[in-house]
Amino acid sequence: DLDTWLYYTFSSEIKSNGEAPLVSSDSEAVVIFFHGSGTAKSSGINAQQLFNSLIEYKISGISFDYPFHGKGPHNDKFYDKMYFLKWLNTIVTKAAAFGKPVYLIGHSYGPDVIAEYLTYYPYSVQGAMFMSPAGFDPILSKWYQTNTKKMNFGGDVQPNEMGGRWAAQMSQQFIWNRTQGQFDPSVINPN
């Protein structure tokens, strides 16, 4: 019903209908991973290895593919920020329905998406962590342009033109970072 693939920890019993629950019954928390953008490999599947290592800590992991990334939706409705944020909230709500604390973790473009999501839903989760945010502020944007963009990561990185275009259009609509702290979700909810 989300028009995307959900990747998640498989560590619990299988239901009688053959489905595996999104969150394990013995988990103590849930982590939702927000991936980066712009390359053909940008996908929620990249967090799958991380999820396997979280099992021993009783943490369930969930990730998904953004619109125009991996197996995510390819629908022009997702160019509207509020439509996209409501869609994200549906994913978070599905995870929260299991009654466990929910935390968001983002990498690269993921922190930007999380910050915008939390601008509108600041109390929907118990906390968030940003890893290597790209373009998060002017200092990081300059670092990316002068250093990271020039790095050779051991091969050709194929771009995802549609995904990159979508992310750029989303970023232009984001308000959390353009209001001198007025909508900063970390001020509204310090967790």
Image: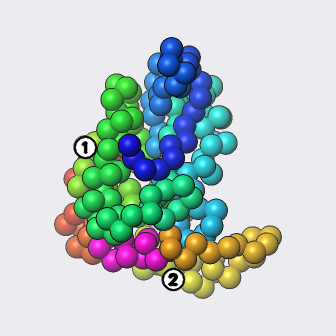
What is the basis of the colouring in this image?
Answer: rainbow
Amino acid under disc 2: Lys
User: Residue at coordinates 32% horizontally, 51% vertically from top-left?
Assistant: 87
User: Residue at coordinates 46% horizontally, 43% vertically from top-left?
Assistant: 32
- Along the polypeptide, which appears first: circle 1 or circle 2? 1
In the rendered structure, find residue 142 and report the number of the disc placed on it. 2
In the rendered structure, find residue 7 and report the number of the disc placed on it. none
Q: Horizontally, is 153 left or right of 188 in the view?
A: right
Q: Work out whether 100 lies above or below 72.
A: above
**Residue at mark 1:** 123
Q: Is residue 175 visible?
A: yes
* Crowdedness near tag 1: few (<14), some (14–19) or many (≥20) residues, C-alpha within 10 Å: few
Q: Work out whether 189 lies above or below 147.
A: above
Q: Horizontally, is 118 left or right of 129 in the view?
A: left
Q: Position of residue 1 (x, y in %)?
A: 38, 43
Q: Position of residue 47 (x, y in %)?
A: 60, 47
Amino acid under disc 1: Tyr
User: Residue at coordinates 31% horizontally, 47% vertically from top-left?
Assistant: 89
Q: Position of residue 102 (x, y in %)?
A: 39, 36
Q: Which residues are magenta?
A: 164-173
* Quarter occupied by residue 150: bottom right
Q: Main secondary structure of the magenta part?
A: helix
Dot 2 falls on a residue whose secondary structure is: helix
Figure label count: 2
Q: Position of residue 164 (x, y in %)?
A: 50, 74
